Amino acid sequence: MTYQSYPTGSAGNAMPQRPPQPQTVVNAVRLMFAGAALGVLGVIFTLAFSGRIKRAVGKAAVKSNATLRSEGKKTLTVAEIHSLESATVAILVIVLIVGVLLWLWMAWANGKGGSWARIVATVLFALNTIYLVLVASRAAVTAIFVGLSWLIGLAVIFLLWRRESSAYINPRLQ
């Protein structure tokens, strides 16, 4: 008994082969790793200067208490101020770690050529732009870190939307 081979379809239905990763994507991925490294530095600086951060938060809380007291409103206790100081540092560290993980995730996903990843990276860059505007007038060190991160993101987005990158990310459109 002989069997016919299973039809494999016509050549017109074949998925196009993904071209090799262009230099624009390679450079974008490298920049994303640089963004992650910058985020790690941010975590280190936040932990190294956590005492100063806590003091600044404590001073702001005491000043706020004075205003609240003059208005006859409830003020924070010493324990609540201490909790606020610690929570502020913890939240900063968590946000920075999430940022590092997002940089690494986007490097991996865009390096694989996921079209969704380029869109997510663009949305994250837009959110970083809003964050930059919000912190630009704040502490100089924070503004410098966010500004450097924004510049890295700008370069990444520029590279990811180049024609060479598009040919790699979505070869069916070419």
Image (cartoon, helix red, strand yellow):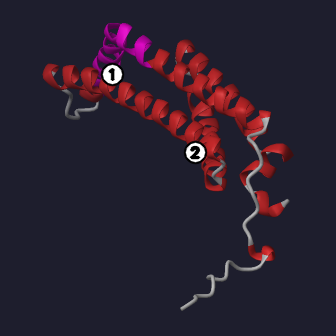
Picture coordinates of residue 35, whole percent (x, y): 58, 25
Q: Residue at x 81, y 75 (%)?
A: 12
The label shown at residue 109 is 2
Q: Is residue 62 magenta?
A: yes
Q: Amino acid at mark 1?
A: Val
Query: Quadrant of the image for the C terminus?
Result: bottom right
**Magenta region, residue range:** 43-67
Q: Is residue 45 left or right of residue 80?
A: right
Q: In the shown orientation, is residue 54 left or right of residue 27? A: left
Does residue 126 appear in this view?
A: no
Along the line of sight, the residue nearer the viewer: 172 or 133: 172
**Residue at left 65%, top 33%?**
29
> Would residue 119 appear left or right of 66 to someone viewing this image?
right
Report whether residue 65 is seen.
yes
Is 169 included in the stretch rendered in magenta? no
Residue most toward the bottom? 1
Q: Position of residue 55 (x, y in %)?
A: 32, 10
In whole angstroms, how far apart are the C-alphas of marks 2 and 1? 30 Å
Q: Pointer 2 and pointer 1: residues touching (CB < 8 Å)?
A: no
Vertical arrangement, residue 114 with respect to residue 41, above or below: below
Q: Nearer the viewer, mark 2 or mark 1?
A: 2
Mark sitting on residue 89: 1
Within 10 Å of the Cα at label 1, are there few (<14), some (14-19), or many (20+) other Cα atoms?
many
- Looking at the rendered structure, the kind of residue marked 2 is Ala
Q: Quick one: label 2, few (<14), some, or many (20+) residues within 10 Å?
A: some
